Structure formats: C-alpha cells, structure tokens
Amino acid sequence: MLSVALVDDEELVRVGLRSILESDPEIMVVAEADDGRGALDIVRRHHVDVLAMDLNMPGLDGLGALKELRRSPDAPPVVFLTSFGAGGQVYDALEAGASGFVLKGDSPSELLRHVHAVAEGHAAVSSPVLRCLMQSALARRDDTIGPTARSRIDSLSSREHQVFMLLGDGLSNAVMAQQLVVSEGTMKSYVSRVLAKLKLSNRTQGALLSCQFTRWLRDSA
C-alpha cells in the first residue's frame, strides 16, 4: 500500500482527491491538511510515501513547505497540484526538489499514474505543465549555463548529446527512440547515462537544462 497525504486549502478539492486516490486499491490516504504548516506536521507524525500538495495556499504555501521538507533526508517526494499557466512557480518548485506536477484539470487516471511514478522514484509531469515549464525556462532572462554545467555537457558523447538536446523538446522515450532509430530500452539507458553525467535527478531537470543550453547557444552565436 502507498500512503499518501493530501494538502490543499479547499476542503471540497481534498474530498475529490481522496475519492480518486482511494479508488486505487494500492493507495491509502493517511492524512490531510489545509496549508504548508499542516503538511510539515503530517510528515512528522505519519509515514508518508507521497505528499500531494497544492502549490498556492495562504500562509505557508506549497513551495515554502517543500523547501522546509528538503532539509530532512527522509522527506517524502512531493507531487504538486497546480493550475495551468503557473510556469514560473512550477519552475521554482522543480528547482527546490519537487518530484511531480499534475494539473487540477487532469483526469483521475493521470493523477493516479503520477502518484505511482513518483513513489517509484521517477519524475512525473503532465504534458501541459511540461510545456509551461519549457516556456518559463526560455523566458527567464537570468538563465545562464555556468562553466560546471558546460563542462558536464561537453563530457557527453555524440549520441548522448543528441539525447540531451531531444530532452528539451519534452518528448517521451518512445518518440525519442523513433527519432534516433534505437529501441525504447536503449533510449532509457541513454537518458539515465545523460542524467548521471549531468548530475541531475530526473528527466524534467534534464529538459530544463537542455532548453537553457539551447538558448545559451543561440545567444552566444
């Protein structure tokens, strides 16, 4: 059983989310809270495999709670619930260590899929949120590629560099594999090697760095 905690300042939203999550026989909602402080208290008092939390809340918001949680090495992964168009906030949350993002308008099956993926240690971002992230990465005027990141990118092999650049398009492993004419399993291995060489924890961070690198190349030309 996966133990999940819900944090949202709207009770009606929590009721709906609980109903969706508990429709999955492998998920149990162990606690609820209505703000970031409540989220921190839940993590102190319960074993939680995944924390599903609203990004925007009064008082301590989701991002603030995440930053507090990341001070603990055994903090649970966080899936943020967000609205379309919150690209800048999502970008900040990703940099702070968020594991997943789900739009509040996504289907119930999408929410369940993301919770399972995050519990297994994967990053999980719905496609509209990923596109929003890409736009935010390209729009930020302070995005730069430092010498350490450039050195790591330079260490990639020719094929790994191709994979790295494709990550910035937000493509799935299957589509990337088709474009490079390799198997999906081989593509998964390439992605893992690329992320390891770049010292990144998930493919979403890889996609953002790829976007930043593309922009840096353009601005440096």
Image (tube, helix red, strand yellow):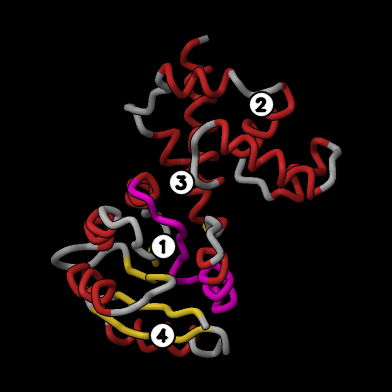
Q: Which residue is drawn at 51% across and 67% down?
A: 119
Amino acid residing under circle 2: His
| Foreground of the two, 8 or 68 | 68
The mark closer to the camera, 3 or 2, is 2
Q: Which residue is drawn at 40% across and 34% down?
A: 139
10 Å crowding of disc 3: few (<14), some (14-19), many (20+): many
Residue with the mark numbered 2: 161
As measured in the structure, the alpha-carbon distance from the residue carrying label 3 to the one carrying label 2 is 21 Å
| Foreground of the two, 16 or 201 | 201
Q: Residue at x 13, y 66 (%)?
A: 59
Q: In this view, does 5 lie to the left or right of 187?
A: left
User: Which residues make up the magenta segment?
Assistant: 96-115
Residue 104: within the magenta?
A: yes
Q: Which mark is residue 133?
A: 3
Amino acid residing under circle 4: Val
Q: Which mark is residue 33?
A: none
| First reached walking from the N terminus: tag 2 or tag 1 | 1
As measured in the structure, the alpha-carbon distance from the residue carrying label 3 to the one carrying label 4 is 29 Å
Q: State the image quarter where residue 158 is shown.
A: top right
As measured in the structure, the alpha-carbon distance from the residue carrying label 2 to the one carrying label 1 is 29 Å
Residue with the mark numbered 1: 77
| First reached walking from the N terminus: tag 2 or tag 4 | 4
The mark closer to the camera, 3 or 4, is 4
Residue with the mark numbered 4: 29
Q: Position of residue 151 (x, y in %)?
A: 51, 18
Does 136 sit above or below residue 12?
Answer: above
As measured in the structure, the alpha-carbon distance from the residue carrying label 2 to the one carrying label 4 is 42 Å
As measured in the structure, the alpha-carbon distance from the residue carrying label 1 to the one carrying label 3 is 19 Å
